[in-house]
Image: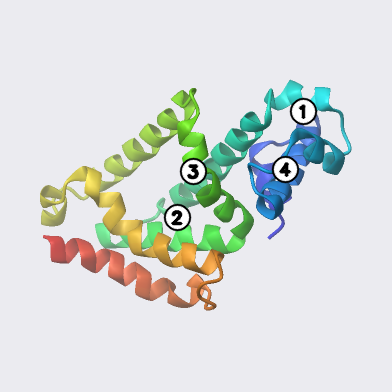
């Protein structure tokens, strides 16, 4: 799927058009040349804009990296929340989380690669308040979801900080391998198996 589709969801309207262009071209530069190697001039040339315009929107290269990272997280979260709207049981919810993760990764592999590539750099930046807030919002949302099914024994036993790792760990590992071309088979082919594995990991823990 075209990366601009994702960007248009997060930055909609004509006023955000240049911002979308800069982010789209920067994403391509980062993936093809590396984040450290890419400079503002390379992005400026690809986006056919001015250095001043880039600085106006993002301040510096690190700002672009951070914006792309947060954009990807937001879109991924919205996909997950949409998938969870109709769940009727904890098992359904766990499997919906896995399914939505795989669907997002296979729809937007460039953004998924970028998330893995940039994670350490973004977390090293001094101003991580927004990232922490988004993580807290995600965790709060998931815990509220989980509490809907508080009658299930598994929720009472598994530590909250471990829950997400048990649910998404194997799926994330396989998606990383697929994105780095270590395996050829799309995660879509193993969606059911990975979702079943996530659920069974909770049941076995309990």
Judge by depth and name the residue closer to the eye, 192 or 161: 161
Residue shown at 42% from the left, 28% from the top: 133
Residue shown at 54% from the left, 49% from the top: 117
The residue that label 1 is drawn on is 54
Q: Earlier in the sequence, mark 3 or mark 2?
A: 2
The residue that label 4 is drawn on is 26
Query: Residue 6, position in %: x, y?
Result: 65, 48
The residue that label 2 is drawn on is 83
Q: Earlier in the sequence, mark 4 or mark 1?
A: 4
CA distance separating discs 3 and 2: 25 Å
Neighbor class of circle 3 (other Cα within 10 Å; few <14, some 14-19, many 20+) is few
Quadrant of the rendered image containing residue 199: bottom left
The answer to whether residue 108 shows anywhere in this view is no
Residue shown at 22% from the left, 68% from the top: 200
Secondary element type, mark 3: helix
CA distance separating discs 2 and 4: 30 Å
Q: Earlier in the sequence, mark 2 or mark 1?
A: 1
Front tag of 2 and 1: 1
Q: Earlier in the sequence, mark 3 or mark 4?
A: 4
The residue that label 3 is drawn on is 119
The answer to whether residue 85 shows anywhere in this view is yes
Cβ atoms under marks 4 and 1 closer than 8 Å:
no
Secondary element type, mark 2: helix
Front tag of 2 and 4: 4
């Amino acid at each position: 799927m075209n990366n601009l589709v994702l960007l248009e969801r997060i930055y909609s309207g004509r006023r955000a058009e240049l911002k979308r262009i800069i982010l789209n071209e920067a994403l391509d530069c980062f993936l093809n040349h590396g984040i450290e190697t890419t400079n503002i001039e390379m992005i400026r040339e690809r986006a056919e804009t001015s250095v001043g315009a880039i600085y106006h929107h993002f301040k510096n290269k690190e700002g672009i990296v951070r914006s792309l990272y947060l954009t990807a997280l937001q879109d991924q979260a919205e996909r997950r929340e949409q998938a969870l709207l109709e769940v009727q049981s904890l098992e359904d919810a766990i499997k919906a989380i896995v399914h939505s993760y795989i669907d997002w990764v296979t729809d937007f592999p460039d953004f998924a690669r970028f998330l893995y590539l940039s994670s350490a750099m973004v977390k090293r930046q001094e101003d991580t308040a927004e990232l922490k807030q988004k993580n807290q919002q995600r965790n709060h949302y998931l815990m509220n979801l989980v509490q809907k099914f508080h009658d299930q024994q598994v929720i009472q036993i598994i530590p909250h900080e471990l829950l997400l790792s048990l649910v998404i760990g194997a799926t994330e590992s396989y998606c990383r391998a697929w994105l780095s071309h270590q395996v050829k088979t799309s995660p879509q082919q193993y969606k059911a198996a990975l979702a079943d594995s996530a659920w069974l990991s909770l049941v076995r823990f309990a």
